[in-house]
């Protein structure tokens, strides 16, 4: 369908991010069957809720989350939605820079052959990435301008996934590894359910993408939602399964990249993931911009 490729890429890139690194950890905590079931359930409810928002927006002729909240719940409901979006998104953006601060400094220090102070190098790299890359991209007026960035990021995530699949092949044919696999562990359910749900969340970004589509419609946006969520959920599922099988005997950490060996290729993937997170930052910033503007200038936007 014409006009859905770029929006699907942008929505998919706004969904995928640091959550992919926690998928093997969720499988370890919940077991293989329960963990993948949680992921599938989260994807199903995400698609359903996104389509409900699109239908609600068209029926009420509202073009933003905040306007829809005002129409449905009044001024107080709008305020709650604005503060919730701002708080949730700032939390997500903070996690982006936590990952950057964990992955980038050792790579730069080893490449330059320097002894590094964890605090100063970490702070300097985070400020560099923030002001030199994330800030200029976040000031773009139109989210369609980021479609090229989205393609590059998704290509890198695909390469990372291929790397994990290839590394796990020896574990897949090892019968001793399969004996250590857990299928269901209910004690990790409440711990991993919010991780899976948040890893697929993109509801504030959906409105930004929807209103910037050429000739937007429910049918077009449904195609965008299905394509992007199915794509990301499939990538998450593959990373969860193969990453779990690869490191099940080593103890899987919350960031699976920290389980990787310290060879040159793994270091390259760590640095590439840091860059992908940085350039994906603006896709998450757009809803915050809209919510802050709506909060400060509600008489203009409503």
Image: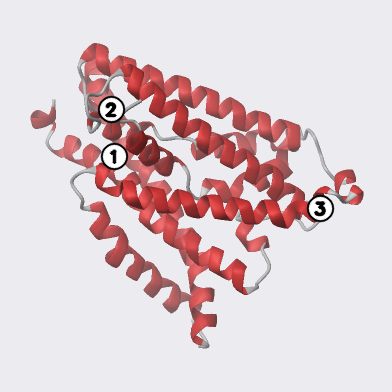
Percent position of residue 41, x then y:
59, 25
Residue depicted at x 38% and y 48%: 150
Q: How many marks?
A: 3
Mark 2 and 1 residues: CB-CB less than 8 Å, in contact? yes
Residue depicted at x 31% and y 30%: 81
Residue 191 lies left or right of residue 226; in this view the side is right
Mark 1 and 3 residues: CB-CB less than 8 Å, in contact? no
Percent position of residue 262, x then y:
65, 72
Q: Residue furthest front?
A: 2
Name which of mark 2 and mark 1 comes first in the sequence: 2
Residue 65 numbered mark, or none: 2
> What is the distance, in whole Å, between disc 1 and disc 3 at their CAs?
42 Å
Percent position of residue 28, x then y:
73, 44
Residue 169 lies left or right of residue 124; in this view the side is right
Which one is closest to the eye, mark 1 or mark 3? Answer: 3
Residue depicted at x 72% and y 57%: 167
> What is the distance, in whole Å, between disc 2 and disc 3 at their CAs?
46 Å
- Are there few (<14), some (14-19), or many (20+) residues within 10 Å of tag 2? many
Q: Is residue 72 above or below residue 201?
A: above
Name which of mark 2 and mark 3 comes first in the sequence: 2
Residue holding disc 3? 171
Residue holding disc 1? 287
User: In front: 72, or 24?
Assistant: 24
Name which of mark 1 and mark 3 comes first in the sequence: 3
Residue depicted at x 35% and y 24%: 221
User: In front: 39, or 230?
Assistant: 230
Circle 1: element type: helix
Q: Residue furthest top?
A: 59
Q: Is residue 66 above or below residue 163?
A: above
């Amino acid at each position: 369908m014409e006009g859905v490729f770029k929006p699907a890429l942008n929505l998919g890139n706004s969904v995928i991010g640091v959550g992919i690194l926690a998928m093997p950890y969720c499988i370890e905590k919940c077991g293989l069957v329960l963990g993948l079931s949680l992921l599938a359930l989260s994807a199903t409810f995400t698609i359903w809720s996104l389509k409900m928002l699109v239908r609600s927006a068209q029926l009420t002729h509202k073009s933003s989350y905040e306007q829809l909240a005002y129409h449905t719940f009044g001024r107080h409901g709008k305020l709650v939605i604005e503060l919730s979006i701002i708080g949730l998104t700032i939390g997500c953006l903070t996690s982006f820079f936590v990952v950057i601060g964990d992955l980038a400094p050792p790579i730069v220090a080893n490449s330059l052959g320097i002894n590094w102070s964890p605090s100063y190098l970490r702070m300097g790299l985070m400020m560099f990435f923030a002001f030199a890359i994330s800030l200029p991209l976040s000031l773009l007026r139109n989210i369609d301008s980021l479609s090229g960035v989205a393609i590059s990021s998704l290509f890198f995530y695909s390469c990372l996934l291929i790397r994990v699949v290839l590394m796990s092949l020896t574990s897949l044919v090892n019968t001793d590894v399969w004996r250590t696999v857990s299928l269901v562990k209910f004690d990790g359910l409440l711990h991993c359910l919010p991780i899976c749900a948040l890893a697929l969340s993109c509801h504030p970004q959906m409105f930004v993408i929807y209103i910037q589509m050429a000739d937007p419609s429910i049918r077009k946006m449904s195609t965008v939602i299905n394509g992007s969520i199915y794509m990301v959920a499939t990538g998450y599922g593959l990373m969860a399964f193969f990453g779990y099988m690869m490191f099940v005997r080593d103890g899987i950490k919350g960031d699976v990249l920290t389980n990787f060996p310290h060879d040159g290729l793994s270091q390259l993937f760590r640095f590439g993931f840091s860059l992908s997170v940085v350039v994906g930052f603006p896709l998450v910033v757009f809803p915050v911009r809209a919510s802050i503007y709506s909060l400060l200038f509600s008489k203009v936007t409503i």
